[in-house]
Image: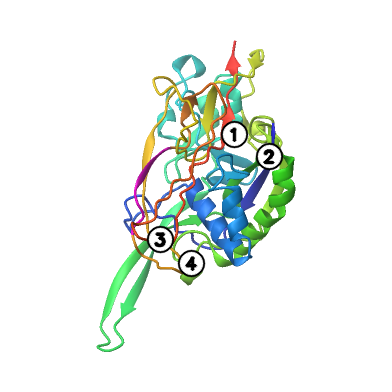
Amino acid sequence: MSPGLVVKLRPTGPWRIGPDSGARNQVDFIYHSDSLYGAVTSALARLGSLDEWLTATARNGAPAVCFSSCFPFIEEIGFVVPPRTLWPPAAPALLATRVRWKSARFVPLGIVQALLAGRPLDENHWAVDGVSGCLVPAGRSGPFRTGVRWNAAVDRLSGSTERHSTACLEFRPGAGLWAVVSFADEDARARWQEPVKAAFRWLADSGFGGERSRGWGRSESPEFTEGTLPDMILGGQGPENGRQVAENTESPEADVRSHGNTHWLLSLFSPAPADIVDWSRGDYTVLARGGRVESPAGSGELKKQVHMVAEGSVLVSGSALRGAAPDVAPDGFAHPVFRSGFALSIPLPEVS
């Protein structure tokens, strides 16, 4: 077990999470772990801890702190990208097949727990919210919807205008995003927990993601829950996980045992040389990550593109996954630009 921290953000307005394509009329539904690490790093730089932070994380083969990606929640239900080996559920786990389970991008944590325990899913209890891609209890809405905001650029010399649109996420009351912070050990928690909390508070005021100059990406004061991993995900310590809306069947509980070789990613992952992964097994997908540099030394240049294993992937490895933070700075840039590929993964239990 390792010390952990769950962070809940309740947006006060639109959020802009740019898609990999960069298209302004599209928006991503996940604020990825590499972007979250970059935002926290920027905040800690303003708080005077940049060099020590980079030494403890990006420059360290065993980072003191790593982050999951940010996933949606609404009221008591925390959603997550489910393990690809469990989702969509196989036919024996279903009581009927009218729900398009495969179209759900996010599911409640309680559903993951139910599937690990071998309990079936009843379609009468669930529906897929087409707007957010969340599997929600029947009759309830998803945590957000996509919106488009219009603006006009005005030429100060000629007075001519050019209208343009930007896509965003608009959150319902009681909804927001949550993430997990993992500390390497108690010493790392003692040193970095309060600075990380301070960084999240600063970011809640200044904004996450794009269009921050318009006031987007802000949230109420973050909510923090301390605990240990993996219990915060599979043991009920963390965000409310929808256990009360999980299936209530009379099937006996399955015998669940810890299985250390199978790892469910809650973050993006860039393998380090020391990571020994059996790529012929498991179930995973890969994303191409790019973007532009934001730095006092120069902004706007394209970062080097890297491929990373996506959230929800299940990898097989005989040891815990670490990951790496490759330097993606453009050639000749003034300083390194690290893209966090540190793994925040949950060992999956096996069901017998």
Q: Residues within 10 Å of mark 1 (few under 14, many from 20)?
A: many
Between marks 1 and 2 in the image, the one whose residue lies nearer the viewer:
2
Magenta residues span 302-309
Q: How crowded is mark 2: few (under 14 residues within 10 Å), some or many (20 or more)?
A: many
Between marks 1 and 3 in the image, the one whose residue lies nearer the viewer:
3
Res. 32 in view: no
Disc 2 is placed on an element classified as loop
How far apart marks 1 and 3 lie (CA) works out to 34 Å
Disc 4 is placed on an element classified as helix
The kind of residue on which mark 2 rests is Gly
The kind of residue on which mark 1 rests is Leu
Q: Residues within 10 Å of mark 3 (few under 14, many from 20)?
A: some
Q: Of marks 2 and 3, which one's residue comes earlier in the chain?
A: 2
Q: Mark 1 points at which residue?
A: 109
Q: Which residue is painted at 59% across and 66% down in the image?
A: 46
Quadrant in which residue 140 is drawn: top right
Q: Mark 4 points at which residue?
A: 212
The kind of residue on which mark 4 rests is Arg
* The furthest residue to the top: 352
Asked whether residue 225 is drawn in magenta, I would say no
In the rendered view, tell whether residue 186 sits above or below residue 118.
below
Q: Of marks 1 and 2, which one's residue comes earlier in the chain?
A: 1
Residue 293 marker: 3
In the rendered view, tell whether residue 274 sits above or below residue 186.
above
Residue 238 marker: 2
